[in-house]
Amino acid sequence: MKNLKPFSERIASRDPDRQAAEIHIRVASMNRFNALGTAEIERVA
């Protein structure tokens, strides 16, 4: 959960369904940022 802090300190929504959706969006964006920053390793013979 500490990795979500850069996106916001607290959840903005009050409805539990919307809170879940908000967290899913944050996690999806974190995963996307991690994928963009990860180097692709190619084997050279």
Image (tube, rainbow, N blue to C red):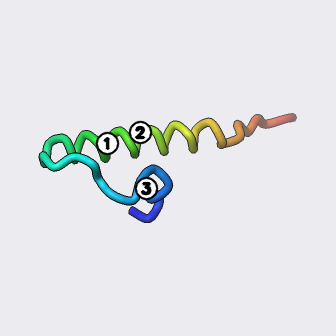
Q: Give the quarter of the figure containing the N terminus.
A: bottom left
Q: Which mark is residue 28?
A: 2
Distance from disc 3 to disc 2, alpha carbons, whole Å, reads: 11 Å
Question: Based on the displayed image, in which of its 4 quarters is residue 20 positioned?
Answer: top left
The residue to which callout 1 is attached is 24
Q: Which is more toward the observer, 42 or 17?
A: 17
Taking 43 as reference, is 29 left or right? left
Q: Are marks 3 and 1 in contact (CB under 8 Å)?
A: no
Q: Are marks 2 and 1 in contact (CB under 8 Å)?
A: yes
Q: Which is more toward the observer, 38 or 3?
A: 3
Find residue 11 and report its horizontal and vertical position in percent. 29, 53
Question: Based on the displayed image, in which of its 4 quarters is residue 26 positioned?
Answer: top left
SS category of the residue bearing label 3:
helix
SS category of the residue bearing label 1:
helix
SS category of the residue bearing label 2:
helix
The total of numbered circles placed on residues is 3
Hey, what amino acid is under mark 1?
His
Hey, what amino acid is under mark 3?
Leu
Q: Residue at x 16, y 49 (%)?
A: 14
Q: Residue at x 31, y 42 (%)?
A: 24
Hey, what amino acid is under mark 2?
Ala
Question: Based on the displayed image, in which of its 4 quarters is residue 27 positioned?
Answer: top left
Q: Give the quarter of the figure containing the C terminus.
A: top right
Taking 15 as reference, is 23 left or right? right
Q: Are marks 3 and 2 in contact (CB under 8 Å)?
A: no
Q: Tell which circle, 3 or 2, labels the residue nearer the N-terminal end.
A: 3
Find residue 42 and report its horizontal and vertical position in percent. 76, 35
Distance from disc 3 to disc 1, alpha carbons, whole Å, reads: 11 Å
Judged from this view, the residue extending furthest toward the right is 45
The residue to which callout 3 is attached is 4
Find residue 25 and report its horizontal and vertical position in percent. 35, 38
Crowd band around label 1 with a 10 angstrom C-alpha radius: few (<14), some (14–19), many (20+): few
